[in-house]
Image (cartoon, helix red, strand yellow):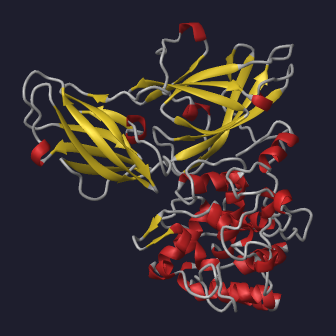
């Protein structure tokens, strides 16, 4: 979740262009303007030609531009299922954490744009009931919304939606927003291909991007699951079971695991007139939602923590208050934690020291617009992170969860190592063997190359080591066996033992083994694998 200290910084962030060919709307000046000035056109965050029909010329047959009105419809649906409103940053962070984007790292305004796009997708499909879901209905109701009558749309909602959802829309006056979202063209502004092209495997026959094509209709709008030309189907998506397709779109609504089950039993819908808050704005920077967490103090500042949990990660919102009677031009705080902080940081920079044993020291200090705090004022900064000790897949994060290794209130007494994580990654070490990690990252996965060293002065006939990780290890390893225990909450214990030619290690010798893996916490699509990334849940040893 992004809270800029000053509105101008938020607007500047929205206008950043991250890659060649990805231009702001002002540069291209060919997007379709939002029909309502209260809503933001997705093209205002950036526009690309990543597929056909991304511009105004693609808005035919009643198709419309994607705007933040879809986010309003999305949160009205979340309200119906008993969930609090979500910001576009929260939706975007969820998409990046679950392999539903081109890149593991969000740049510029990627997280906000992706959040708007997936909120639209969830609102388009997530209202449908499990027992009546049919992909063809997605085409029929979208076509009716674009070219037909609103009453006919609502008749279909009664027939195919969750019980009570149609009455909920009508009683609260939400029909127009819902129908306007059905009209939106997923290809518009290019985000579907240039930012939301997820490589997550769905049932081993398709990827997330294929299933996203459920809402892309043929040129005559008679068929769902169509390709970028609107002329032929997105073939891999047709091999995915209908139940999995619906659960995938429902995961967008609840911000849950895209491969799990959701919204089977909704219970009682909310009362009429109990409005969800407007999500189109990511929040007022003057009044962010800080809870009653314990306040921590150090060097003229106090720190309070709020934020949200998502699959394998979290977004932390930190209220840093200047308790002094003069302006602070530099501030910092430090804490110990089992969690890692990602490069998604706003108003601050985080330097991390690996203390070993799955524990890290994080130094947080103000940066750019977040560097100075007037006397008695509060600065709101934010960062994303990956969970060390599991915290769950939804809910709130607080200071106790974030500072789970302890708060440092005296910098002079900390016994931190002098080196940081920018150097070589240390190996995992046990009584008999040490393990050095090398390898490469690729789309959604990695190849781990392990050097297992005999640290004794005698031959080891059989060796093993264990580690915790968010990653899974499918397939057949070479030189070893891997037995995995699912610990829940997205964490696994892997027991690696020598096998075949690598079963024995001479005294002081080394064997080289390896395996392919599937990324849990996103590591990126290119680059090198190291021990911190592989053993992201902690090293156990023998």
Res. 54 image quadrant:
bottom right
Q: Horizontal placement of 340 versus 331: left or right?
A: left
Q: Is residue 64 above or below residue 91?
A: below
Q: Judge by depth and name the residue closer to the eye, 507 or 526.
A: 526
Q: Which residue reaches farthest right?
A: 37
For this rendering, which residue is in front, 41 or 291? 41
Q: Image point 70% across, 30% down: which residue? A: 348
Q: Decide which of 64, 541 is in the foreground and name it.
A: 64
Q: Quadrant of the C terminus?
A: top left
Image quadrant assignment for residue 341:
top right
| In the rendered image, the vertical position of residue 354 relative to residue 102, given as above or below | above
Give the answer, above or below, for where 7 lies relative to 117: above
Q: Which quadrant holds residue 384?
A: top right
- As rendered, which of 253 and 357 lies closer to the eye? 357
Q: Residue furthest front?
A: 20
Residue 27 visible to the viewer: yes
- The x, y position of residue 250, in whole percent, is 58, 69
Q: Which residue is depicted at the point 78% across and 63% down?
A: 42
Where's residue 251, x and y in %? 57, 64
Q: Residue furthest top?
A: 412
In the image, residue 40 lies at what x, y percent? 84, 61
Could you tell me how many numbered marks the image carries?
0
- Taking the image as drawn, is residue 265 in sight? no
Residue 355, x across and y down, in percent: 44, 23
Residue 490 lies left or right of residue 369; in this view the side is: left
């Amino acid at each position: 979740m992004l809270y800029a200290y000053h509105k101008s910084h938020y607007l500047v962030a929205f206008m950043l262009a991250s890659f060649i060919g990805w231009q702001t709307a002002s540069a291209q000046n060919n997007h379709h303007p939002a029909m309502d000035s209260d809503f933001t056109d997705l093209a205002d965050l950036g526009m690309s030609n990543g597929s056909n029909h991304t511009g105004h010329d693609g808005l035919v047959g009643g198709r419309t531009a994607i705007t933040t009105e879809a986010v309003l419809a999305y949160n009205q649906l979340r309200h119906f299922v008993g969930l609090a409103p979500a910001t576009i940053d929260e939706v975007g962070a969820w998409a990046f954490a679950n392999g539903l984007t081109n890149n593991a790292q969000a740049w510029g305004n990627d997280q906000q744009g992706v959040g708007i796009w997936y909120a639209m997708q969830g609102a388009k499909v997530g209202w449908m009931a499990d027992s009546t879901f049919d992909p063809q209905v997605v085409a029929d109701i979208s076509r009716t919304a674009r070219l037909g009558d609103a009453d006919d749309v609502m008749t279909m909602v009664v027939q195919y939606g969750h019980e009570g959802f149609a009455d909920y829309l009508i009683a609260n006056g939400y029909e127009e927003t819902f129908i306007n979202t059905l009209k939106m063209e997923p290809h518009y502004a290019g985000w579907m291909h240039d930012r939301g092209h997820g490589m997550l495997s769905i049932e081993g026959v398709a990827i997330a991007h294929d299933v996203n094509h459920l809402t892309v209709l043929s040129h005559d709008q008679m068929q769902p699951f169509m390709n970028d030309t609107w002329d032929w189907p997105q073939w891999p998506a047709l091999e995915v079971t209908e139940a999995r397709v619906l659960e995938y779109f429902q995961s967008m609504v609840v911000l849950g695991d895209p491969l799990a089950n959701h919204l089977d039993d909704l219970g009682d819908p909310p009362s009429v007139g109990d409005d969800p808050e407007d999500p189109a704005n990511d929040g007022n920077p003057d009044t962010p939602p800080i809870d009653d967490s314990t306040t921590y103090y150090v060097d003229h500042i106090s720190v309070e923590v709020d934020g949200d949990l998502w699959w394998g990660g979290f977004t932390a919102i930190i209220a840093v208050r200047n308790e002094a009677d003069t302006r602070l031009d530099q501030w910092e705080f430090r804490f110990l934690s089992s969690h890692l902080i990602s490069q998604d940081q706003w108003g601050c920079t985080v330097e991390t020291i690996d203390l070993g044993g799955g524990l890290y020291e994080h130094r947080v200090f103000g940066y750019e617009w977040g560097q100075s705090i007037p006397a008695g004022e509060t600065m709101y900064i934010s960062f994303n992170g990956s969970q060390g000790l599991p915290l769950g897949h939804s809910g709130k994060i607080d200071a106790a969860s974030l500072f789970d290794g302890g708060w440092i209130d005296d910098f002079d007494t900390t016994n931190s190592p002098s080196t940081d994580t920018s150097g070589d990654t240390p190996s995992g070490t046990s009584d008999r063997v040490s393990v050095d990690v090398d390898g490469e990252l690729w789309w959604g996965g990695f190849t781990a190359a392990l050097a297992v060293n005999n640290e004794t002065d005698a031959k080891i006939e059989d060796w093993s080591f264990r580690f915790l990780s968010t990653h899974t290890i499918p397939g057949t390893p070479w030189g070893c066996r891997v037995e995995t225990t699912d610990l829940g909450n997205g964490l696994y214990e892997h027991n690696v033992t020598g096998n075949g030619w690598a079963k024995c290690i001479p005294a002081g010798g080394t064997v080289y083994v390896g395996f392919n893996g599937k990324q849990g916490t996103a590591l990126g699509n290119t680059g090198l694998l190291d021990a911190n990334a592989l053993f992201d849940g902690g090293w156990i040893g023998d």
